[in-house]
Structures are given as C-alpha cells and as structure tokens.
Image (tube, coloured by chain):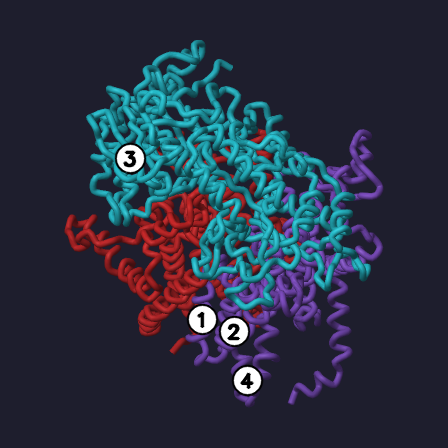
C-alpha cells in the first residue's frame, strides 16, 4: 500500500516537475520527480553493520542516519541529535569517559513511529553482540555501557578516557537502526533478516521501495522526513554495476544519470568526457594517500616459509635509510598526479594530509624530484655499479626490487613511471600486479596478500574514518606487524618498530588537548615519512564524482558519505 | 536409447556430487577472502569476527556437507513450503550469500529474467541467423555471400566484446543518442510501448552477443556441410533424381548436424552462466554479473551454487546432445 | 597393403597439396599476411630498436604520422610513426613486442587445446570403454569456474615456475597452460561426436574387416575426416586465446603490466577510443587479420587435403 502511494506521488510530481523549476531551492517535497544515481560498484546490502563496503555505507546513508555527520570541512554537524555534545556544553564529561547525546524532539521513523533513545541503545547492542560479526565494531571500541536517561537522552560510558568520543553514532559508519525492526535480528540471527537488511526503516530523506542486491535500489521520498520541503526528489533509482568509465559516460555524455560516484579515471579521459557538456566532474580532498610501503624485512624466497618477511631477517638493502631515501628522491610526484589523478590529486609527503589541524606543513622535501641527489646518496652509502650491468651493488647485494600492487590502470601507469626513475638511479625493478580481491584479502594461505608482503615495495592507498587519525597512526606499533603467529593479520605492514614511536602512541592516547594532539600526530607522521622513509607517500588522492549540470545542491564530502546531503539536492532551471 | 538415457541419468548423480566436491575444494584452495572488499579502515580483529560470523571458522569437511544438505534438502523444503503453505523447512538455514546475507536462490531468481531476455534471446537470434548462413555458405562455397559471411563472422569473433560493446555505446548512445547505454532491470513489459523500450535497451547487448554466437555456429555448420556435400551418398541421391532442396535440406543437413548440435548444446549452459563482460558493459546485471561479483568478493556460497547449477545444466545438455546424435544418425549406438 | 603405394611417392602427394593450396586465393593471402605479421613481430624489433617500455612523457599522445596528411596541426613525430600512448611509449614498438607475446600465447595455447581435445575426443569416440569416463571428465572441466582455477594455479605454480624459468617465461608457461587446459572441451566433444558417426560408416567397417589396427584406423581414416571441425576449432581457438590472455591481465592474472600484448593494448585504449581511435585500430586490426588469415589458411588446407576436391 505504502509503496503504491509513494509511486503515485512520484508519477504526479514527475508531471508537475517542469513547473516547479523556477523556484528550485524551495518548494514542496518531491517536486522534482526522479533522481538517478549510479555507483559502478553495486550495493549488496543496506545494513551498514553487516557490510563495511563504501558502496553499501553510502547507499544506506540515504535511508538511515547517525546522530551527527561530518560536513565537507570535517566538522561534526548534528543530524538526529539536538546539538554536538562537547566538554564546553557539558555533553562530554570532564574526565572524557562519557558522552551524553540528546535527540531532536518529534523525530519519526519512516513508518510513522517515534524515534526514541531506546533505538540508540538497541543500535549499540546490535553491533556489540559478540556473535553478530558487526563490521563497525571498532566504532564501539572501549564502550562500556550505553543507557537511556530518558526518552530523548542517551549516555555512552567508556572504559577509559576517550579524547575522541565521537566514535559511536557519528558518521556514515554508525547510523541508528530501528529497534522494532531489528529486535529479532541480533547476533547469529542477523543474516536471517533479509527484509530488514534490504529495507531498513530509517529517518533519512528516502525509503526503499525495491531493493535488488548488487543491482539496483528504488527509493521514494520519506513522507515523515523531519525537514519540510525536503527531499526535492520524489523517487530515486540507485543503479549499480559496470565500471567507472561507463558511469562517467552515463552522467557526462549521455545524460541518463544525474550523479556518478568515484570517477577513478585518467584525467585526460575525464576531461574529454566533460566536453560532453551535460555533466561536470567535482572533486574534494580527504585523507586518502597513495603510498609506497617499504618492506623492512627480507621477503626472499630463499628463506624458509614462516621466516620470510618477518622481523627475524632485516631487509638486505631496504633496511638502510639512504636507499629508501634515494628511492623516494627519484620520484616526480607532480608528474604522477598529472598522469593519474589531475585535479583529483596533489603531491604529498605526508601520511596524514588532513584535516588541517593534524597535517604536517613543513614536510615538503620530497616534492621535487632529484635524480642526481639520489645517485649521489647511493654512491655515498657505498652502492656502486662495479660490474657495469646498470644495477648498483654493495657486498654482493644488488639493488633489485619486486614492486607489487593491485590491478588498476592508474597504478600500472605509476608502476611504469617509477620503474623508469628507479632504473635511472641504478635500481632494477620487477613489476607485479595482483587481483585486488587477493591482494587486499587476508587469506593466510596466499603469498600475494598485502599483509604478507612477499615483495620489497608495495603500493596502495589507505585513509582513516572521520577526522581523527589516532587509530591510524597507532597501527605502526612494534609487534602489530603481520606474522605467522597472528595468521598474518596485523596493520604494521612495513614491520616498523621504534620504541620512541610507541611512546608517542601511548602519549597520544592520554592527551585530550587538541593542540597537543596535533603536535604529537605531526611528530608521528614525520617519523614514519621524512625521518625514516618507511612510508613514502606519493599522492593525496581526492575524491572525484560526476554530477549532471542540472543537479543543484551537491556538496562533495570526503569525511562522511558522499550522499550526506542528498535531502538538499534539487533540479536547477536549465 | 531409453535404457541408455536412464543409465546416464543415474550415473549423473555421482558425477554431479563429485563435481560439486571438486568445485568446493577449488574454491577452498583459491586464495581470496570475503573481507577483501572491506575498507582497510576496518581493523583485522573485526574482520576476523566477521569471518567467524559467516561460518568460515569451520573446516571444509563441516561446511561441504552443510552446503549439500542446504542445497538438496533445505532449499527444496522451502520451495514446497512456499508452494503449498506447509512447514517442512521449519526455519532451517538456507544458503546465504556472504555479500548480501540473503538467500542465494532469491537472488538467482531475481537475475533470471534479464539474463533470459538478453543472453537467451541473443543465443536464439545468433543460432537462427547462423544456421542459414552456414548452409548457404557451404552450398555456394566461395561465392560473394560466403566470402562476406566469412569475413564478417571472423572479424566479429576476433573483436572482443569489451571493445565492440563500448564502440556501440559510443556510436548509438553518446553520438546518436538513439539507445540507452544502461539497461534498466526494473523495467516491466506490459504494453506495446514498454515492449519498445525493452527492445531498445536490449538491442545492443543482443547484437554484441549474437555476433559471437553466429560466428561460431555458422563456421561449424559450414565446415560440416562442406564435408558432407562431397560424399558419395549425395551423388547417389542426386542421381536418383531427388530435388536439390531435398538433397541439401534433408540428407546433407541431417548428417551435418552432429558438430553443430554439440556446439549449440555446449552453449546453452553458457547462457545461464551469463555473459560476464557484455553484462558488465551494458549494466544488464544478470547471472554473469552476479557470478563475477561473487567471484571477486569471494562469496563462496553464491559461487558454489551458481557453478553447481551450471554443472547440472552442462551434464544434462551433453546428455541431450548424445541422445540427439542417436536420433540424427541411428547407426550411433551406446550400448 | 595399400599404404605402401602412398608412402612410395610422398613428395608428389605433398606437391599436389601445395598446388591445390596455391589456387586458393584467400589461403595464399592469409599465409602471406601471417608470414608478414610474424616477421614484423619477430624481426621488427631488430630494425626498429625502440624500447617498448621506454617512457617519454614529453612526447606523450603523439598521433600516427599519416594523420599529418589531412591534419596539419596533428602532433606527430617521425620517431614514432604509429604515435605514442599516454605515457609516451612508442606504439609501434609496443605492437611488435605485444605481437610476439600474443602470437606465442595464441598459437601455443591453441595447439595445446587442440592436442588435448582431439586426443580425448578420438579416444572417447572410438573406444567405447573410455567414453563414459572421458566425457564425465569433460563435464567436470566444463563446470569448473575459470577464475578460481587460475588463481589456484597461480598460487601453486607461479613461484616454482618463476624460479625455474624466470618471471617472463614462468608466467608464459602458466598462462598458456591455463588457457590450453580450459579450452579443449568443445573440440573434444565435437571430435567425439563425429568419430562416433564415422565409426559406423561403410569405409571404416571395410577397413576394420581387413584387420586394420586401431592406431592406423585413427590416423588414416578417422582423423582426416574430422579435420574440418578441428580446423574451425583451431581458428576460433586462436582468437579466444589471444582475447582470454587480455582478460587475464585485466584481472591481474596475466603478464606483469610492463609486458604489452595486443589484447592488453586494446583493452587499455578503449577508454580513449574517441580521442585516439588509432590506438584501438592497430591492435584490433592485428588480432582480426591474424585470425582471418588463419581461417583462410584452414579453408585452403582443408580443400587441399581433401582428395575429392584435389582430384577435380
């Protein structure tokens, strides 16, 4: 019944749409008819707690909402919450061990029932169920208790001081789900609730009318949405599948779709598509950094299995700072950006390129390529080409590198360029590209995972959720490296180990002052990058999406879901 | 022939069980991880918990019999339940996809229409075009018709769909704006107009796929006809004064069908396997796209179920082909 | 036996075949093109000694030299007659280098698939006792999903092969074997079907009644009569192998990214098809024409080897 009414409304507003163009910004709900969005990776499920995939999180963000979201500058803005709790307004306790959220009053779920603090408490219980396999469990790290103070107030208590208490219920990763709908889906029963997982009842601007996994989602405007006159669109088709090129073509050349996500395309291809005239690429920067990871341990296949790439054997030449430094100096990052990312990338030497309060500003030494300097550095460290084969060696060790990454057109172009530059300074490189589902998988039986690191150098991109890089920088702790005893799980990919660094991690965990945290994080960033060249950042990768020229209100946001403000989107006059 | 068919049907049960086992072990051995597509921001210990929730903590000798049980007992129970309103299944766990956490059979059923519309149609079209082309090409060997047919089908076969599909989109969707570049799987055909819309969105993928089928089938048809046209029995038939059409269409064609039947029978399971690249390019999102996404995401229950269903089709189609051999050429005996 | 006469004058028989083959215009042209493209790829790099992997970022996106004929402003250079790609690599050198790999992969995988397919097909069709087992085995291989199979092969054999033959040779063996052992099934089923029908024909019964042993029966009587479908399989198999290789490298299972192949050049250029049509035309043409010439050679050979046609 509901679906039918919604669809009827859609048809009616479609007919009325042209008349409403004049005053595009405001007007009644659903005035602009149909919105078409294409994601070239198709959403599989609309329950963000059962899948951490970006495509799933972002499609779900149109339906379910958190208490607060990050806006395009990285600042928290209240969504379901009345305001952002801080120490100043008393929402966060002085000792940083608890945070109290207050819900807006009068909020309704899309089925018409009231949103209460019980739903928030339930959401936490749902994710923290030990048998559920919740993908966002790390958001609830350190949560000791979540309790409802009254119908609209929720208090989260942590087991220790949390300098950043905005893990649970903020950002696209932890939206509030309805207790009534998911009550029977706790723990091991989570996958049995297909209807709920495919059509969660939410507070967002849209409701699901038809969900086809890995294919297409049909949505209609939520009649109970809290803002009058929003969303401007009555229905949404959210199509998935294909590839980035095809999605870009559909928005910028044929005009069949209004918004396409993640246009990972070479800049010249993107530019020639934009000449189509019906759409434009838009971009914004976040914290995603494409980097080279140096293996500090020996990956040689001569070592017995179980000792390869472990701290038992240091790398024959990459353990030397001068070699790592020379490899970084030989790279022309400007050119990499020009070839691979265009307006969506900028050269960087930082692991943490943003937000501004945390980014190191004086770490710019790597930005200019210096082939001669690199040669001199290697020369000075005793690496010379004594047998005339073009490859430098010292004590019988030759500078031969196996350089691996995942299969992706831009990464293969980068490999070719970097191989060329390293060739110029007398380092021979063998390239290898691996299927992403193997490379990024954690199968301990496969030699090709990025954690196992059976190569000298590898390249990929990583970032952190939200705006706080504490967990991200804490990955490089001694002992956190992937190793046989941990089934090759671990985040310290380079096998970096420095007690001084570990001390900084501990200090960071105990520091609440934002200025002091910024200082610590900058020092840690510099230790990993310019001081040791363990991680060699290449490009600060922005996000590029494409939007139709007739679509207004789009603000690309890299700190939260790209569709964070879809309620405010509208159709412009032309 | 009947005993042969029954014997083969019985024999196909252990064959299929063995095939299921081999596929399962292959997937088990293959490197890959359902968590590979999760962002790196999710810490390893959370991923490990998610793997356990998917049942990956159990060893293969627990999971394989479980899959067999779910496939052969639980799923049919659910079908009976939904058809007759009974409750045989009693809440038993169905085969659940790792990616979508939903029953794989529901997803497969959802994908069937677009795959049949596009891939199935292209196969029918392809075969229907290929047979006359093959026959005429052979009968008028080295005529202009034959030469053109050879040229077009060989070029058609050697141009991969990732190129020909995009070329069609660039011409017909981007430049001319005649056809949609993205297939709408939610489109319902219930009137003449909606049928036209369906036709417009089908035409490009069908063309790309039919070209491949046509090329392949017509080449085999032609070669086989050529072999038979020079046989003694053709001369005899002509000498007896039989009309040319009876000679060609009845005697020669019938004797030339064996390789063609083989190729057609092998192609039918491939329809249900979908057309991975073509489906991707036109966003048809049928079974081929489902399979490739499941493979990339290491969605073992989904891959296992689809490939096993395909295996059933392969075994059945090859059985049908064998039976057809016997009908086409009664001298072929199996017992 | 009758064989002695035939072996006594083998020369004249093969001359007959050649004479007949020469009359087939398509086949001669096909052979000519095949020799040309093979020499182009094999000897080309000797004459045109530009490193296909050499980047020249300042000269990226050059157009082919012939564009200068109609477009005076086209960015061209004599040093790169076919133009350069988006990283400034010379396209001609890449087509040559890519052709070496594509042709080698195509031929080897095709021959491997034909050998396996024909052997299994003949054995299953001729000896009834092998039929059940071999055909069920064929069903099994048909049912195996290709991608996990190749992943498992990579996992098990890549490092040993790399150690034994070097990175390039090792991956070559792996890919060729992978394609070969997953594409013989159609040939096997076709050959088996034809052999089963032929086996009951009068001439086979006649040959059997005079006590021809199975081996000679197969090589003398059956194989020549299933040659045409095998030829078709060969032609289609060559095309499939070249294209499959490109699909593999696109999945990260093929050659390392710095080894160009025709299929990969084609795949990489599809995104820029409208701005730089030549980049898809060169490799596309190379693949298509190679397949077309193999097809014509197959036609010519079939005619030439058929005594009924040759006699006319």
Closer to the N terminus: mark 2 or mark 4?
Answer: 2
Say which element carries label 4. Answer: helix
Q: Is residue C59 above or below residue B307?
A: above
Q: Do the residues labelled 2 and 3 touch (CB within 8 Å)?
A: no
B312 left or right, relative to C61 = left
Q: Chain A is drawn in which colour?
A: cyan
Residue linked to disc 3: A157
Residue in the foreground of this view, choosing between C127 and A311: A311
Question: Which chain is painted in red?
Answer: B
CB of mark 1 within 8 Å of CB of mark 2?
A: yes
**Can you tell which mark lies on residue C214?**
4
Which callout, 3 or 4, points to the residue nearer the camera? Answer: 3
Sort mark 1 into few (<14), some (14-19) or many (20+) by Cα contacts within 10 Å. some
Res. A179 image quadrant: top left
Q: Disc 1 and disc 3: Cα gap in Å?
A: 62 Å
Check disc 2 and report the residue beneath it: C120
Instruction: Please name which of the two marks, 2 or 3, marks the residue nearer to the observer.
Output: 3
Disc 2 chain ID: C
Q: Chain C appears in which tint? A: purple
Task: Provide the residue designation for mark 1.
Answer: C137
């Amino acid at each position: 019944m509901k679906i039918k009414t919604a669809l009827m409304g859609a048809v009616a507003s479609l007919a009325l749409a042209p008349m409403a163009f004049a005053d595009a910004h405001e007007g009644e709900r659903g005035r602009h008819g149909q919105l078409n969005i294409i994601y070239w990776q198709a959403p599989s499920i609309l329950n963000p707690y059962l899948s951490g995939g970006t495509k799933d999180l972002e499609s779900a963000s149109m339906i379910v909402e958190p208490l607060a979201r990050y806006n395009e500058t990285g600042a928290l803005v209240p969504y379901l919450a009345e305001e952002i709790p801080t120490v100043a307004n008393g929402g966060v306790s002085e000792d940083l061990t608890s945070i109290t959220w207050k819900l807006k009053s009068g909020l309704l779920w899309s089925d018409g029932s009231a949103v209460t603090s019980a739903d928030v408490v339930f959401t936490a219980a749902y994710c923290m169920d030990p048998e559920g396999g919740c993908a966002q469990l790390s958001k609830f790290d350190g949560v000791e208790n979540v309790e409802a103070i009254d119908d609209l107030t929720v208090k989260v208590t942590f087991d220790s001081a949390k300098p950043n208490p905005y893990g649970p219920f903020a950002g696209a990763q932890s939206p509030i789900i309805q207790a009534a709908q998911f009550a029977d889906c706790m723990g091991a029963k989570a996958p049995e609730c297909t209807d709920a997982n495919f059509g969660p009842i939410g507070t967002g601007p849209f409701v699901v009318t038809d969900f086809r996994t890995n294919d297409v989602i049909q949505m209609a405007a939520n009649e109970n949405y809290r803002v009058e006159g929003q969303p401007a669109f009555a229905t949404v088709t959210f199509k998935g599948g294909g590839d980035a090129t095809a999605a870009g073509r559909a928005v910028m050349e044929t005009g069949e779709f209004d918004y396409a996500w993640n246009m990972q395309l070479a800049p010249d291809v993107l530019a020639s598509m934009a000449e189509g005239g019906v759409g434009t690429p838009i971009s914004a920067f976040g914290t995603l950094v494409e980097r080279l990871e140096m293996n500090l341990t020996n990956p040689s296949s001569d070592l017995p299995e179980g000792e390869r790439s472990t701290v038992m054997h240091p790398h024959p030449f990459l353990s030397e700072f001068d070699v790592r430094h020379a490899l970084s100096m030989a790279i022309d990052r400007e050119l990499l950006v020009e070839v691979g990312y265009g307006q969506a990338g900028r050269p960087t030497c930082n692991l943490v390129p943003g937000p501004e309060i945390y980014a190191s500003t004086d770490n710019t030494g790597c930005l200019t390529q210096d082939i001669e300097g690199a040669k001199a550095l290697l020369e000075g460290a005793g690496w010379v080409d004594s047998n005339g084969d073009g490859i430098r060696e010292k004590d019988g060790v030759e500078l031969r590198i196996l350089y691996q990454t995942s299969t992706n057109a831009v990464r293969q172009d980068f490999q070719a360029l970097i191989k060329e530059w390293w060739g110029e300074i007398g380092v021979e490189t063998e390239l290898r590209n691996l299927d992403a589902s193997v490379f990024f998988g954690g199968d301990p039986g496969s030699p090709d995972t990025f954690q196992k690191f059976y190569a000298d150098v590898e390249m990929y991109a990583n970032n952190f959720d939200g705006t706080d890089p504490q967990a991200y920088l804490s990955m490089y702790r001694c002992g956190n490296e992937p190793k046989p005893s941990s089934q090759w799980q671990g985040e310290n990919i380079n096998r970096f180990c420095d007690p001084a660094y570990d001390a900084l991690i501990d200090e960071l965990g105990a520091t609440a002052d934002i200025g002091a945290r910024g200082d610590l994080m900058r020092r840690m960033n510099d230790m990993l990058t310019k001081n040791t060249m363990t991680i060699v950042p290449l490009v600060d990768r922005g996000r590029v999406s494409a939007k139709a020229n007739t679509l207004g209100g789009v603000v690309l946001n890299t700190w939260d879901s790209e569709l964070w403000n879809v309620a405010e989107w509208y159709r412009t006059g032309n | 022939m009947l005993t042969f068919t029954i014997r083969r049907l019985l024999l196909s049960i252990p064959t299929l069980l063995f095939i299921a086992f081999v596929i399962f072990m292959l997937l088990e051995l293959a490197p890959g991880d359902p968590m590979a597509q999760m962002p790196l921001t999710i810490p390893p210990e959370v991923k490990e918990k998610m793997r356990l929730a998917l049942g990956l903590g159990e060893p293969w000798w627990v999971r394989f019999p479980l899959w067999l049980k779910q496939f052969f007992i639980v799923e049919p129970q659910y079908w009976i339940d939904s058809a007759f309103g009974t409750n045989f299944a009693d809440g038993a766990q169905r085969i659940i996809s790792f990616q979508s956490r939903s029953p794989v059979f529901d997803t497969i059923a959802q994908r069937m229409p677009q795959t049949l519309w596009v891939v199935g149609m292209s196969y029918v079209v392809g075969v229907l075009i290929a047979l006359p082309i093959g026959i005429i090409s052979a009968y008028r060997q080295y005529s202009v018709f034959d030469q053109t047919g050879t040229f077009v089908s060989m070029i058609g076969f050697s141009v991969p769909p990732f190129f020909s599909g995009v070329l069609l989109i660039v011409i017909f969707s981007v430049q001319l704006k005649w056809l949609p570049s993205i297939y709408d799987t939610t489109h319902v055909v219930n009137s003449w107009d909606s049928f036209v819309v369906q036709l417009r969105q089908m035409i490009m993928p069908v063309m790309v796929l039919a070209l491949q089928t046509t090329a392949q089938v017509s080449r085999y048809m032609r070669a086989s006809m050529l072999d038979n046209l020079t046989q003694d029995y053709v001369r005899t038939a002509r000498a007896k004064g039989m009309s040319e059409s009876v000679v060609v269409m009845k005697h020669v064609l019938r004797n030339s069908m064996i390789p063609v039947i083989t190729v057609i029978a092998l192609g039918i399971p491939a329809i249900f396997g979908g057309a991975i690249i073509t489906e991707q390019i036109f966003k048809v999102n049928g079974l081929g796209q489902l399979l490739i996404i499941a493979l990339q995401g290491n969605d073992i229950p989904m891959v296992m179920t689809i490939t096993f269903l395909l295996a059933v089709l392969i075994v059945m189609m090859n059985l049908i082909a064998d039976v057809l051999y016997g009908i086409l050429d009664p001298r072929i005996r199996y017992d | 036996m009758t064989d002695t006469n035939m072996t006594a004058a083998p020369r004249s028989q093969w001359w007959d075949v050649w004479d007949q083959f020469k009359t087939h215009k398509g086949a001669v042209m096909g052979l000519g093109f095949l020799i040309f493209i093979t020499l182009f790829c094999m000897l080309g790099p000797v004459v045109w000694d530009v490193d296909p992997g050499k980047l020249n970022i300042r000269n990226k996106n050059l157009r082919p030299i012939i564009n200068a004929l109609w477009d005076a402003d086209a960015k061209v250079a004599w040093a790169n007659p076919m133009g350069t790609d988006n990283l400034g690599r010379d396209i001609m050198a890449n087509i040559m280098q890519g052709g070496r790999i594509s042709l080698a992969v195509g031929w080897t995988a095709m021959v491997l698939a034909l050998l396996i397919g024909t052997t299994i097909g003949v054995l299953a069709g001729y000896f009834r006792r092998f039929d059940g087992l071999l055909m069920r085995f064929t069903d099994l291989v048909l049912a195996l999903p290709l991608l996990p199979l190749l992943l498992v092969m990579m996992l098990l054999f890549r490092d040993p092969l790399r150690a034994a033959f070097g990175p390039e040779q090792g991956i070559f063996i792996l890919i060729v074997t992978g394609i070969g052992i997953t594409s013989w099934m159609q040939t096997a089923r076709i050959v088996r079907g034809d052999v089963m029908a032929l086996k009951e024909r009068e001439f086979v019964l006649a040959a059997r009644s005079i006590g021809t042993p199975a081996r000679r029966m197969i090589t003398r009587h059956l194989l020549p009569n299933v040659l045409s479908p095998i030829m078709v399989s060969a032609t289609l198999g060559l095309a499939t192998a070249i294209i499959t290789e490109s699909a593999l490298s696109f999945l990260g299972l093929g050659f390392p990214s710095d080894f160009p192949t025709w299929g990969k050049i084609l795949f990489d250029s599809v995104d820029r098809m409208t701005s730089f049509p030549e980049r898809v035309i060169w490799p596309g043409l190379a693949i298509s024409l190679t397949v077309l010439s193999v097809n014509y050679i197959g036609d010519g050979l079939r005619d030439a080897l058929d005594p009924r046609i040759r006699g006319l």
